[in-house]
């Protein structure tokens, strides 16, 4: 039997990350979830096993280039080349620019934008060698339209798509695609914990009248990771229920 292709998902133990891991596993990939927290990762892995998913995990601090190098070398050594990289890891640290300390700006840029570079940089050589690969970067609606109190987050998420478009052009002739997905408000634990009145205000701005499901983002990842998506590269797929539409 052929060995399963390997997919590595950073932020794989989060709400959207978990759905992505499950979706890729169902479509036949050997999935490794990257997490910065060992304890959280082992609890997550056990909970997933109870649901019938056999995931591997790896410890990676995406903001640290050397940590990314080590994690990817470990995965490649044990499981073989990474066919699919999904960059889901991300943080927020909201405040207006007037009140934002420089280190709060930097921390969000380091994880969200530099973290995406660090992971891409460390997988790209082996993808080029094998002349195949899929890189899928998770951005955000707020990287497309901006958001009050999120200059750091919006800049990092807009930057991700700039990286995507440029890298897509560099590697297209080698059978590698690079795409962005920009989710709107998704019903993860984090969003569901928002007070009811604020949540209702958010939903009132979404034309389809509800929050998105993590599985709806995961299905886009599953498609972009497939053989059928070979002609799509450098794209940004907005999945936001119509909350933000642009040409």
Image (cartoon, grey):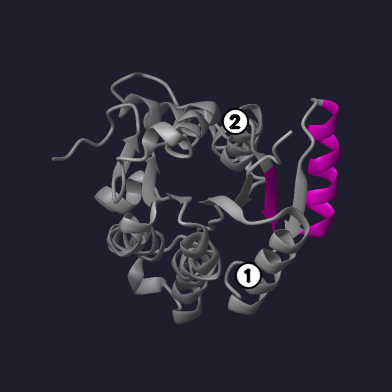
Image quadrant where residue 52 sits: top right
Q: Vertical placement of 12 versus 76: above or below? A: above
x then y, percent, for residue 80: 69, 55
Single out the residue that lies furthest toward the front: 1
Q: Earlier in the sequence, mark 2 or mark 1?
A: 2
Whether the magenta-drawn stretch holds residue 137 is answered as no
Whether the magenta-drawn stretch holds residue 49 is answered as yes
In the rendered structure, the answer to whether residue 236 lies left or right of residue 63 reads left
In the rendered structure, the answer to whether residue 14 lies left or right of residue 131 reads right
Image quadrant where residue 13 sits: top right
Q: Residue at x 79, y 36 (%)?
A: 54
x then y, percent, for residue 37: 76, 59
Q: Main secondary structure of the magenta part?
A: helix
Instruction: Return the residue at label 1.
Output: 68
Tell me the quadrant of the picture where the N terminus can be found: top right
Q: Vertical placement of 112 versus 79: above or below? A: below
Q: Residue at x 38, y 57 (%)?
A: 174
How crowded pointer 1 is (Cα within 10 Å; few <14, some 14-19, many 20+) is rated as: many
Q: Vertical placement of 111 versus 225: above or below? A: below
Query: Are dots 2 and 1 in contact, CB under 8 Å?
Result: no
Q: Residue at x 32, y 55 (%)?
A: 172
x then y, percent, for residue 10: 60, 54
Instruction: Return the residue at label 2.
Output: 23
Give, as a single range, the part of the protein colored magenta: 31-50
x then y, percent, for residue 98: 34, 73
Q: Residue at x 45, y 27 (%)?
A: 212
- Tag 1 secondary structure: helix
The mark found on residue 193 in the picture is none
Whether residue 106 appears in this view of the structure is yes
């Amino acid at each position: 039997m052929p060995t399963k292709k390997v997919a590595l998902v950073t932020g794989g133990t989060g709400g959207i990350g978990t759905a992505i891991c499950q979706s890729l596993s169902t479509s036949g990939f050997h999935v490794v979830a990257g997490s910065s927290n060992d304890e959280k990762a082992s609890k997550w892995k056990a909970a997933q096993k109870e649901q019938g998913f056999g995931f591997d995990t790896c410890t990676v601090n995406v903001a640290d280039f050397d940590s990314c190098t080590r994690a990817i070398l470990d995965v490649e050594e044990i499981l073989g080349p990474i066919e699919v990289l999904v960059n889901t890891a991300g943080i927020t640290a909201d405040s207006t620019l007037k009140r934002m300390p420089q280190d709060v700006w930097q921390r969000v840029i380091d994880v969200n934008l530099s973290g995406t570079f660090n992971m891409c940089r460390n997988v790209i050589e082996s993808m080029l060698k094998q002349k195949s690969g899929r890189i899928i970067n998770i951005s955000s609606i707020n990287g497309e339209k901006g958001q009050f109190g999120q200059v750091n987050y919006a800049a990092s998420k807009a930057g991700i798509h700039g990286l995507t478009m440029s890298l897509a052009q560099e590697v297209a002739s080698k059978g590698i695609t690079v795409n962005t997905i920009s989710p709107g408000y998704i019903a993860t634990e984090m969003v569901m914990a928002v007070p009811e009145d604020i949540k209702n205000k958010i939903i009132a701005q979404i034309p389809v009248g509800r929050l998105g499901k993590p599985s709806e983002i995961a299905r886009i990842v599953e498609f972009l990771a497939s053989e059928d998506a070979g002609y799509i590269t450098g794209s940004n797929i907005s999945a936001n229920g119509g909350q933000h539409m642009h040409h």
